[in-house]
Amino acid sequence: MTATPGPAASRTAAAITVSDRSSDGRREDTAGQVLVSALHTFGYDVAAPVVVPDGVGSVAGALRDAVAQGHRLVVTTGGTGMGPRDLTPEGTREVITRENPGLAELLRREGARHTPYAAASRGVVGVVDWPSERGAGGTLVVNLPGRPSAVQEGMDVIGPLLGHLVDQVAGGDH
């Protein structure tokens, strides 16, 4: 099932991979490649993923950059687990204005159909509200785990909802 994004402004998305090993070249960024492919499937224009190291500041900075570029949708992969450097949710919370726990729980619940480890994901979903002088709405931010199969499974869950969600975040009608 594919979702059609709403207004032209909402047809771009940013993909961000959060990984120390991918950012320093020790590992290929396969999760980011899966994410970009899935976003294309759901009708979004997206460039190659931005790859940043784990950490609150690197995640928050990459999210702020994507919002400043005008993306209505930003999806991250990686850094949502229980490891000491898995700080994507903390970096995301520094940037989002409003959290949507229901969507994050949907991702965990559906992920548990594939692996019990889905319950360990601490990913968040939320909105970065834009200042009024910038225009209506904001940016939807979704955190997905770093495993390529979990990225595909998460996009299969949330992808069909994206058109409606991004339209709402952009100020569209319910």
Image (cartoon, grey):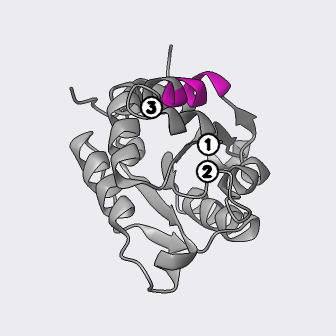
Instruction: Give how far apart the Cα atoms at labels 2 and 1 are.
Output: 5 Å
Which element carries disc 1, helix, strand or loop?
Answer: loop
Whether residue 89 appears in magenta in the rendering, the answer is: no
Q: Is residue 57 left or right of residue 11?
A: right
| Residue 21 can be seen, yes or no | yes
Q: Which residues are magenta?
A: 101-108
Q: Quick one: label 2 or label 1, which is nearer the N terminus?
A: 2
Residue 71 in view in this figure: no
Please tell me how crowded label 3 is: few (under 14), some (14-19), or many (20+) other residues with Cα within 10 Å: many
Q: Residue 174: x, y in percent? A: 50, 13
CA gap, disc 3 and disc 2: 13 Å
Q: Is residue 127 above or below residue 64?
A: above
Q: Is residue 66 above or below residue 108?
A: below
Cβ–Cβ below 8 Å for labels 3 and 1? no
Q: Please give the residue where the numbered disc 1 appears in the rendered image.
A: 123
Q: Nearer the viewer, residue 120 or 46?
A: 120
Residue depicted at x 60% and y 41%: 121
In the rendering, at what x and y percent does residue 136 appear? 61, 36
**Residue at the disc numbered 2:** 80
Residue 95's tag is none
Which residue in the rendered view is the most extreme toward the bottom? 25
Picture coordinates of residue 98 (x, y %)?
73, 34
Residue pointed to by mark 3: 111
Give the image location of residue 36, x and y in percent. Answer: 32, 56
What residue is at 64 percent from the left and 38 percent from the top?
A: 127
Pick the front one: 160 or 19 = 19
